[in-house]
Amino acid sequence: MKLQNELGPNIPVNKPLVVRTIKDVTKEQREYALEKTEYNVFSFPADLLFVDFLSDSGSGTMTDLQWASLFHGDESYGRNKGYYVLLDAIRDTFERGDKPNRAINLILSGETNVKKLMDELYLTSFEGGFVNGGVHQLIRPNAFIVPQGRCAEFLLFSTIAPILKEKYPSNEFFIPNNGHFDTTEANITVNGITPVNLFSANLLDEFPYDQMDNRNPFKGNMDIKRLETLIHEKGVDSIPLIYITITNNTAAGQPVEMNNIREVKKVANKYDIPLFFDACRFAENANFIKEFEKGYQNRTILNIVQEMFSHVDGFTISFKKDGLANIGGGFFFRDNGKFHEKFSFKEDIGIKLKEKQILTFGNDSYGGMSGRDIMALATGLYEVVQESYLNERKFQIRTFARKLAENHVPVILPAGGHAIYLNMDKFFEGLDAKIDEFRGVGFTIELIRHYGIRACELGPFAFEWDKKNPEQQKGILNLVRFAVPRNVYGPSHIDYAVAAITELYNNRDKIPKVEISRGANLRLRHFQTGLQPIYK
Ligand SMILES: *Cc1c(COP(=O)(O)O)cnc(C)c1O
């Protein structure tokens, strides 16, 4: 008889205890709602959809332990107990590898020994890592919790831009990334810095769908040759930071190899430039390294995460990703590291950041989150690195991609960690669809109209192709993303989506082009412009 793990990679790892009924909305009702919301998929009411793949961000199901943690939430203004638990959970996750402290258990177990609480949680001091503690966090702040990832990006870029301009008044500045996320790109741009995408050259290469369980080309990697060229062309003083996004959301959610991280780090060291992660899906990325990179198969996720983060000087993160929590974000940099040294110009950079954090998001110990959010997030950090969960999630996405590929739909392969992406250039191949007709957006409108399924264009419309110079246009991929929220959907949702996408693909000549009817010049316009599909 076969052993249990020979019956497929997917032994069930969880079960839902709460269900929500989906409403029986008609096509006519959706058409009316589309018209009333200017055909902008972001403004379409979620409650009128059957399946929502707009984002995996904060839209996941919390576990029973996370719900239980909410009751331990402490809404005190100054130094709520969750603050200490969260900071230590961050040290556990990113720095301690296989030796986590789990100070969170002191709170969840109702510890009453005051001396123990003081010694092990409230008055412990830390320095030298990503999260100073005790008096060191006051003297040299280096950990900033905020409501979401983009708040961390705002804090970072709006604080360093004036420093750069003061230090190098006649320079232009560029921040390279293996793929800037839209809000990262926007936060860099509004501060007068130019974001540069250095996608891996193999990103759009063909990949056989039946090989997804066997190998992975790590298409999320940064193109290191282009990184060196950029630094040579622009000069070291024009590159304030190098960023690696794990996984590479803008590049089809593809993972980044440990070896690539190491190689980028070498370049960063050579030119003395701080290296940062956009760490939004660090756990999913670590899981890909474990499955596919040589030498990592027998290491734990926490151990791999520890190695990944040992190579960087800091990171911004959205804790809404990786299915971690419904809200939360942060910015962390190495105590007395390269970033601290480079940007502490006249004044400690941490103190400057903290002043801005207090001005915009509140006291540093809650950073715009409720005490309940903080506890759910801390608990989520311990759950998201569990391999059974990560594998189940990864195989769900892989199955989604494989089923589409079997139906000949042009899906980017192999599948990434949190979403499947369709290649719209291929989708409309042979139909003379011009890039500024935004047919990818037309496809997302038709998906809602006919089938009540929401996806999101991340291509020429979202990344403002028509407003960029030819060099920047080269950095824009033409994709539509179906992001899968954590623990929300099962096989029936995926199968329905595969059938709907295939049906539209087979009728792609009927998909309308889309014009911008209002707000073409708004920034981050996919969130706010009005649209009009043009049916022939
Ligand atoms: C979502 C995301 C962000 C921004 O985080 P928010 O919490 O949505 O503000 C930044 N980078 C990447 C790669 C993301 O996926």
Image (cartoon, grey):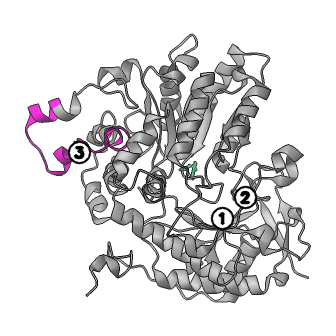
Q: CA distance from mark 3 to mark 1?
A: 39 Å
Residue type at mark 3 is: Arg
Element class at badge 1:
helix
Q: What residue is at 76 percent from the left and 86 percent from the top?
A: 506
Tell whether label 2 touches label 1 (CB within 8 Å): yes
| 356 left or right of 170 in image | left
| Place of residue 421 in the rendered image (x, y in percent of width and height, measured from the top left) | 65, 67
- Note whether 457 is above or below 509 in the view shown: above
| Place of residue 253 in the rendered image (x, y in percent of width and height, measured from the top left) | 59, 58
**N-term mark: 1 or 2:** 1
Q: CA distance from mark 2 to mark 3?
A: 41 Å
**What residue occupies the far left of the structure in this picture?**
113
Magenta span of residues: 90-119
- Note whether 317 is above or below 379 in the view shown: above
Residue of label 1: 42
Residue of label 3: 102
Residue type at mark 2 is: His
Q: What residue is at 34 percent from the left and 36 percent from the top?
A: 77
Residue 476 colored magenta? no
Residue 193 visible at all: no
- Note whether 226 is above or below 325 in the view shown: above
Residue 108 colored magenta? yes
